[in-house]
Image: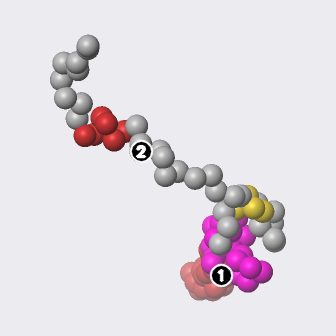
Amino acid sequence: MPVPKRKRSRARRDKRFANKGMKIHAITGCQNCQAPLLPHAACKVCGMYKGIKVMNTKLDRALTRVATRQTKRKTAAPAQASGEQGDAQ
């Protein structure tokens, strides 16, 4: 009867059963934007969870960044204009 030449290590043996516990998760759609979503998780696209906005998304942060930059430019522009007029006189 054939006998193994060497002992199979625990790591090699346990690799066979590593994926045994993996389960297929149900994927639902976001109620707000219909993006694919795991159950009981906030949407990464729109930031909604059960109809309530719970987190800021990348788009939200980008829009606030643009708005703050525009306000800084508007406040800085009159100060530069008044300084230039004073130099011309």
Q: Residues within 10 Å of mark 2 (few under 14, many from 20)?
A: few
- Say which amino acid is labelled 1: Val
Calculate the distance from the C-alpha at mark 1 to the C-alpha at mark 2: 35 Å
Query: Which of the 4 image quarters holds residue 33?
Result: bottom right
Q: Nearer the viewer, residue 78 or 31?
A: 31
Q: Position of residue 80 (x, y in %)?
A: 60, 80
Which secondary structure, mark 1?
loop
Span of residues in magenta: 41-61
Residue 43 rendering spot, x and y as whole percentages: 68, 68
Front disc: 1 or 2: 2
Residue 59 shows in this picture: no
Which image quarter: residue 85?
bottom right
Q: Residue at x 70, y 77 (%)?
A: 49
Q: Residue at x 49, y 52 (%)?
A: 21
Nearest the camera: 75 or 33? 33
Considering only vertical position in the picture, is 54 above or below 59?
below
Is residue 59 magenta-colored? yes
Q: Is residue 27 above or below residue 7?
A: below
Left or right: 1 in relation to 38: left
Residue at 67%, 67% in the rendered image: 39
Q: Which mark is residue 18?
A: 2
Amino acid type of the residue that numbered disc 2 sits on in the rendered structure: Ala
- Disc 1, disc 2: CB below 8 Å? no
Query: 59 or 75, which is in the foreground?
Result: 59
Q: Considering the numbered disc 2 on the image, is that residue within a helix, a strand or a loop?
A: loop
Which of these two is toward me, 53 or 12?
12
* Up-down relation of residue 16 to residue 87 (above or below): above
On the rendered image, what quadrant is the C terminus found in?
bottom right
Looking at the image, the residue that sits furthest to the left is 6
Residue under label 1: 54
